[in-house]
Every structure is written in C-alpha cells, then in structure tokens.
Amino acid sequence: MSSLIVVGAQWGDEGKGKVVDLLTDHANVVIRYAGGHNAGHTIITGSEKYILHLIPSGILHRGKLCCLGNGMVLDPEAFLKELKALDKRGVKIGKRLKVSPDIHIIMPYHKTIDLESEKLRGKRKIGTTGRGIGPAYVDKVARTGIRLADLCDRKVLKDKIEHNLAEKNFIYKNIYKIGTLDGAAVYRRFLKFGRLLEPYVADISKIVDDARKKGQNILFEGAQGTMLDVDHGSYPFVTSSNAIAGGACTGIGMGPTAVDSVLGIIKAYTTRVGEGPFPTELHDDVGEQLRDGGSEYGSTTGRPRRCGWFDTVVARYSNRINGFTGLALTKLDVLDPFSEIKVATGYRYKGKLLKEMPASSEAFSEAVPVYRTVKGWEKSTCEARTFKDLPPRARDYVRLLEDLSECKFQIISTGARRDETILRENPFGKGRGSRRR
Ligand code: IMP
Ligand code: MG
C-alpha cells in the first residue's frame, strides 16, 4: 500500500496529465484536491488526445475510482459537459466517479465577478482563466458559499441563493452597472444540477481511509503549480487554492501521515500563463522557439504561455515547500534543437546574489537571474528508454538540474506519448529520494 501526491513544481502546465496517466496503472484510487476547471490536463493515449479540466485523469483507465475532494470548486455545468464528452468518446464511468458533498459550487455570479473584477483591476489584473474560481473561494472563506450538499436541499438552497443574491445584485447594479440576476431562475437551475449530481456524492475522506485499510494505492492529483499556490506562490498573481502537496490534506480530509511520497512535476524549461513575475522569462526568438517546440498554449484558455529557462531557485523552493521524494522532468525533448541552454542558478537583487527564493514579492519581481550556460546536445531524445540512451550532454543537463534542484529525477519524459518515458525509479516506492542538504 502506498499513497502519492503528484504536484506541479512551477507555474502549472508541467505535464502532470501525462505523468498521472502513467502512474494510474499503479493506483486504485485517483483524487483531485484543489482548483476547478481552471486546470487543463492533456493526456495522449494511443492516437487519442483528451483534455480534462475537472475530472481526474484516472477516469480514462477502466476500473479506477476517481474522486473530487472538498478542496476543489465545482462548476456543475462544466462537470456535466465533461462527463458528456467522455461518454461520447466511449469512456465508461458508471460508479467510478465520486464528489465530496463539501465541494463549493461555482455560481453564475462567481464567473461574472471574476471577469468584472479583472476589468476593474486594469493594469493590476491577474490574468485569471475567467472561470469564477477566485470568487468561489472568496465566498467559501467568507462562509457564504454554496456547497454540493446544499444543492440537494431545496430549503437551504433557496435561502442561500436569496441571501447571496441580495449582495451580488447590489454589486452588479452599483459597481459593475450591469443587469441583475433573477433568484428564482438561479434556484431552479441549481436545484436541477443538485438532482443530476446527487448520485456522485460520497465521503471522499472515508474513501481514502478505507482504501488505505484495504492496502490500496492512492494517487492524489494536484492541479496548477506551487508558484500559483495562494499561500506560497507569487502572490497576488496566484490562483485561490492550495495547489501544493499540503493542500491534499485539507482538500480531502486526511492527516499528513496518510501520505507516503510526493512527486513534483517539473518541465525542462519554465512557462507561465497569466500575469505576474517570471525571472527567467525570454522575450526573444529563443522564447518563441520554446513556445513553438513545446506547443505552449494554454489548454484551458488557448492563451500563448510565457516561456523561459529552467529556474533552479524555483525548483529548490518548490522542493522545500512540498517535501518532494522525487521529481519527474518533462519535455526534455523540446530542448533537443538548442545549441546553447541556460539554467538560472540564483538571482541578483539590489547588487546582492540570492541563492534562495526572496521572501518579498517585490524582490521576486525585480530579481535578475544569474545563468549557467551549457552546450546543447542537438540530437533527438524521444527514442531514449533508459537514462543511458540519452545523448551525453542531455545526461549532463539532467544531472546539473538534479544537483541544483537537490532532488532525484525519478522520471524523465521526452515526448507526449506514454512510451516516450524513462522510468528510473517508481515514485510510489517508499523512502525519500530527496538529496536535501
Ligand atoms: P484563476 O485560477 O483562474 O483564478 O487564475 C489565476 C492565475 O492562475 C492566472 O495566472 C491563471 O493563468 C493561472 N492558472 C490557473 N489555473 C492554471 C493551470 O491549470 N495552469 C496554469 N496556470 C493556471
Ligand atoms: Mg494545464
């Protein structure tokens, strides 16, 4: 029996979808614990390509139980749409999908508030996915949120919608200057969603506990990435949930002792969508080449991703925040054509050399990366199936990143396909692979 958290080590889009898909072979249960349909996980199985936003990637594997934990936020329309799309493509779900009754519901006003407040922020905008994620978490913390259990209780739902709309309609009218919402229509619509979603309701915390008692393997599927975590990311340019490994405990309802291993997913370079600081960002042809080579366009919004070199300050920080037992390096093949590759080893800020993530967001915004430049391998890595198969310079690059990230790379991915993977160690295996000094 073993349980493993898979978490993004950078700003999301590290290729978690592919790695989770591979590891699902070893898992009985797959559970998401944070975020909502702002996520976009791309999975390629044979000639089929799937992009999942809300439902754990494990759903593509027959017989695997998939759960949505209380730490997530759920847009019922997006959920039902994703279910329908999977059904259309022949993915059999049956009783394999469970949702926590405590999951907070994204209401129509959350999406409007998300879009309107971005407009009001002007130059300070966050560049959200516009899905209503942040405002839904705001209501959760404000203790006015509507949970899945509430959709299944007429009286509670009616009362909560009325109470919420009194405030939201005031904001609509007086701040956004837009038409207000009709409470009765919202109530009818969400009551219907409640009826459609009720069959999926289950106690996810208990499912995890039971799975552990049965000696099963559990995979906790993170969304977004460490640098987008609301507490430990590049605040305020973050998402509104705890994307980090620690978020799995609160986002599911289990103690830290229920987790055996934490696998960080890290891309061989860096990308970010949306606004906010990004020290190693490239604004030149090299950045373009990374974007083209890696098809770096948001799988949720289609926005071009900002691209830059690998940042070992971020990698070390991420290792510290998440307590990785191992890392999976993805998209190494994207660097195949480069004759020269840079790696940030530290930052320069106000004349000082920083080796660690600065505590202040101002310093992070102004940090100038200090690079080590290495020669590229200029050969294809896609065919490599063992570490030894990699060109010598690619091996050197991996070793350098491993050394500076202070963590073992258990998996190296050199393509989107399942077989384009070097498995050096099974991440489900016990024991810390971290070489933290
Ligand atoms: P929100 O999550 O829609 O509120 O967006 C907040 C920030 O997180 C924006 O910069 C988004 O681009 C970013 N973001 C949210 N979800 C993802 C994701 O799954 N991958 C990458 N960036 C994301
Ligand atoms: Mg993504």
Image (spheres, grey):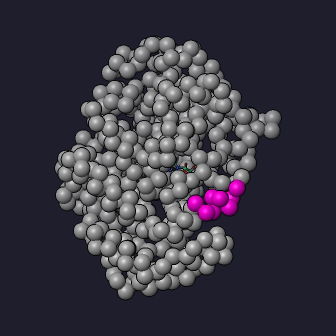
Residue at position x 39%, y 67% from top?
A: 103
Between 5 and 17, the one lying in front of the other is 17
Q: Is residue 331 visible?
A: yes
Q: Is residue 144 visible?
A: no
Q: Quadrant of residue 279?
A: top right
Relative to 344, 97 lies left or right: left
Relative vertical location of residue 249 with respect to residue 397 in this rendering, above or below: below
Q: Position of residue 273 (x, y in %)?
A: 56, 43
Q: Quadrant of the C terminus?
A: top right
Is 347 or 48 nearer to us in this picture?
A: 48
In front of the other: 40 or 137: 40
Magenta stretch: dominant secondary structure? helix
For the residue pair 47 and 373, the one nearer the viewer reads as 47
Q: How many marks?
A: 0
Q: What segment carries the magenta color?
A: 115-122
Q: Residue at x 28, y 69 (%)?
A: 196
Give coordinates of residue 408: x percent, y percent: 44, 32
Q: Position of residue 378 (x, y in %)?
A: 49, 13
Task: Give the quarter of the image for residue 159.
Answer: bottom left
